Image: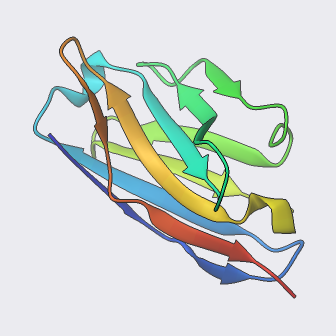
């Protein structure tokens, strides 16, 4: 299983970023996909999850109305559109899949929101 994130970077408060995660090594269409984040000194937290068909989504309260998770099952890709970014969104963002045997994580992509 391989999860490769991209799209992180530095942005000013109020800005936007789009993260992408390309998955391989498992049957992508069999599992929900999630984004997590971890800020320095804090526990890793789940940001968003999308179901297999993309029709249902979970969001952490802290990102509701600002972030949108989506997936493209033809490209084995899950995306996280992040709008109205705040300084507290600064973190390393990880793509994750929970299969029948294990949880798999990407290497992470850093998002920094600062003026």
Which residue is drawn at the image coordinates 71% and 57% (left, top)? 82
Which residue is drawn at the image coordinates 73% and 47% (left, top)? 67
In the picture, the quarter occupied by the N terminus is top left
Given residues 39 and 96, the one toward you in this image is 39
Q: Is residue 20 left or right of residue 77?
A: right
In the picture, the quarter occupied by the C terminus is bottom right
Q: Is residue 97 left or right of residue 99?
A: right
Indicate the position of residue 90 as horizontal and vertical percent values: 71, 66
Residue 49 is drawn in which quadrant? top right
Residue 60 is drawn in which quadrant? top right
Indicate the position of residue 69 as horizontal and vertical percent values: 60, 40
* 13 lies above or below 52: below
* Residue 9 visible to the viewer: yes
* 110 lies above or below 4: below
Which residue is drawn at the image coordinates 42% and 45% (left, top)? 95
Given residues 102 and 65, the one toward you in this image is 102
Total labels: the figure holds 0
């Amino acid at each position: 299983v391989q999860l490769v994130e991209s799209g992180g970077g530095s942005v000013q408060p109020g800005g936007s970023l789009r993260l992408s995660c390309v998955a391989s090594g498992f049957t992508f269409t069999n599992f929900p996909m999630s984004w997590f984040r971890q800020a320095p000194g804090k526990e890793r937290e789940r940001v968003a999850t999308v179901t297999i068909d993309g029709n249902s989504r979970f969001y952490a309260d802290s990102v509701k109305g600002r972030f949108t998770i989506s997936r493209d099952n033809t490209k084995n890709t899950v995306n996280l559109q992040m709008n109205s970014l705040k300084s507290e969104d600064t973190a390393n963002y990880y793509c994750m899949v929970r299969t029948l045997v294990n949880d798999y994580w990407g290497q992470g992509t850093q998002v920094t929101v600062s003026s």
